[in-house]
Image (spheres, rainbow, N blue to C red):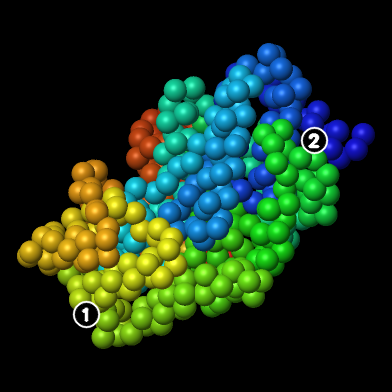
Amino acid sequence: MSLVEQTRAALRALYVRDNRPWVVAFSGGKDSTLLAQLVGEMMLEMGSAARKQVYLISTDTRVEAPNIEEYLARTMVQIGTYADHSGMPLQAELVRPEPPESFWGQLIGKGYPSPTRWFRWCTSKMKIRPMRRRIDEITARSGSVILLLGTRRAESPERAKRMMGRELTDAGLNPHDEIPNALVATPIVAWNTDAVWEYLLTNPPPWGGDHRFLYNLYRQAEGGECPVILDLGQPSCGGSRFGCWTCTVVKLDKSMEGFIDSGEEWMRPLNEFRNWLKVVREERDWRQDKLRNGIKVEGQKGPFKPGKRLAILEKLLHLENICKKSLINDEELGYIQQVWSREFDLSGRSALDLALRFGRHPICWEGSMSLDVQDDLLEELVAGSDLDPELVRGLLRLAHDRYPNLDGYGMKTGFEREIRATIERAITNMENA
Ligand code: SF4
């Protein structure tokens, strides 16, 4: 049996095995595109026998490179429309961070310096949480889900090692490390890169069009995709991949430079802005002396000063005009004003007035501030220590959500085992970052 036939047979056997809905994590990159296509083809072939619900979920961080964002949105609409017309139980959804979790909400609103390898606040807020929220909603309704990931062994030796070490159920599934009641399947684990491209370039997707645009994106960017990230144990999505156009975790944004070199001149000002963000985060006089919780810590600088946040917002709005692309949305502007009003802006209008000057009409953001409160509390807890806030968040979640009581048989042992696993994952993450 060929690899394609084996994968198709395994997918179908998994689909009919039980009633648990599937969640296909879709990044728009080649691997998850292949996975989505194989799932779509399987459902098409099964016809009315395909009754189990499949959710194809993608995260738009709100700072995706505009050409990638457009491609992703277009593809999701195409898949959704096709599924509707053909009556397939397949739902394509884009999830996004809430304004308090967004890049601009954090950087311009709260003054967080842009992320680095050692202070990578972005992945958890912009990628993991929005996806987790949606998966948790589905799990709450259905009891449990099967999560399909387009992970491949050939992607990196580290990933291959991690995958080998996982315990599998008899159906080849493994429990997700951090999402309760989610089992993970990796149907294209054995595919190599050539096989992925060969399939995509010779088989148009059932929802129409072809994959030439995607192929050209890769050729232009000379990189790999930024995978769907569901936990921080996965390596950083910065690097020579399609990532956020604002990513300062990497020294140079090779994919953006690749796009510019291949003629996408409109991206040059974006790249210059990114490089500028990387410089100003290190300017000591741009940063407050105290951390956000009011504590002064030797050798550490706090968030951006109010005037500097204003300067960054002004430069960003100016950049929008130059590129003629929307780079920050009205809700984020409303949230920024809310934070500024709380922290320093006595007029309660500085961000709004600035936005109006650039022809923008921000809307008041009325969402819950509980996300902020949780973050601030956590920051206060770990301030001045070398503790990773994400590790602390993971341990709290474990104690609060997974092991609220330790009276049952084996609960203490399970709790200890998972604490150890959580700490090991945090160490791996720091090594990978
Ligand atoms: S691409 Fe960069 S900025 Fe975006 S989530 Fe990943 S590490 Fe953070």
Does the closest atom of ligand 1 sit within 8 Å of the Cβ of label 1? Answer: no
Q: Nearer the viewer, residue 72 or 427?
A: 72
Which residue is at the far left?
A: 346
| Residue plotted at (47% across, 29% down) | 138
Residue 296 visible to an observer of this rendering: no
Numbered disc in front, either 2 or 1: 2
Q: CA distance from mark 2 to mark 1?
A: 56 Å
| Residue plotted at (22% across, 61% down) | 356
| Residue plotted at (38% across, 65% down) | 320
Q: Nearer the viewer, residue 20 or 278?
A: 278
Decide: few, some or many residues near mark 2? Use Cα within 10 Å; few <14, some 14-19, many ≥20. some
In the image, is 149 to the left or to the right of 10?
left
Which residue is at the far right?
A: 1
Three-letter code for the amino acid on which mark 1 is drawn: Asp
Quadrant housing the N terminus = top right
Task: Assign a secondary structure to mark 1.
Answer: loop
| Residue plotted at (52% across, 70% down) | 266
Which residue is at the far top?
A: 48
Q: Residue 326 at what x, y percent from top left?
A: 40, 58
Q: Mark 1 = which residue?
A: 289
Q: Quadrant of residue 33?
A: top right
Decide: few, some or many residues near mark 1? Use Cα within 10 Å; few <14, some 14-19, many ≥20. many
Residue 7, label in figure? 2
Q: Residue 322 at what x, y percent from top left?
A: 41, 70
- Is 147 placed above or below 226 here? above
